[in-house]
Amino acid sequence: LEQTIWPLAIFGHTHALGLKVEAWTFNKFWSRIGSADPQIPQYFRPIENPIILHTNEILAVKCHYENLFVIIKIPFGVH
């Protein structure tokens, strides 16, 4: 991050195989900001324990998905 931000909510959006989306921050250790279930109606969900993200912290998002019966490539990231 290049400036201080105050995250207010998380929005979970994935493809059909997505189970959970998590937001994390890193500054000497990993800390979970919040999570969302992408299979229920999508809207911004408030962050349960508000935090301040400072300059030089890393902001990351993690998508959990299940691909037990689908035999296809699943792209991720920016295309």
Image (cartoon, rainbow, N blue to C red):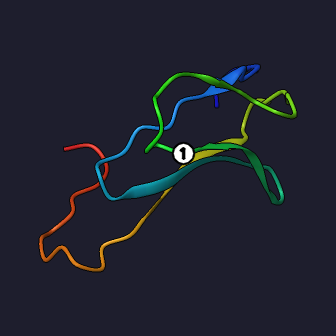
Residue 58 image offset from top left, x and y in percent: 66, 45
Residue at (27% x, 43% y) in the render: 78
Q: Pick whichever, 10 or 3, lies toward us.
A: 10
Residue 51 image offset from top left, x and y in percent: 85, 30
Q: Look at label 1 and name its amino acid.
A: Asp
**Mark 1 burial class by Cα count in 10 Å: few <14, some 14-19, many 20+:** some
Residue at (18% x, 73% y) in the render: 70
Q: Pick whichever, 69 or 13, lies toward us.
A: 69
The N terminus: image quadrant: top right
Residue at (29% x, 51% y) in the render: 16
Check disc 1 and report the residue beneath it.
37
Q: Residue furthest left?
A: 72
User: Horizontal placement of 73 versus 77: left or right?
Assistant: left
Residue 18 image offset from top left, x and y in percent: 39, 55
Above or below — where is 64 with respect to 9? Answer: below
Q: Residue 75 sits in which quadrant?
A: bottom left
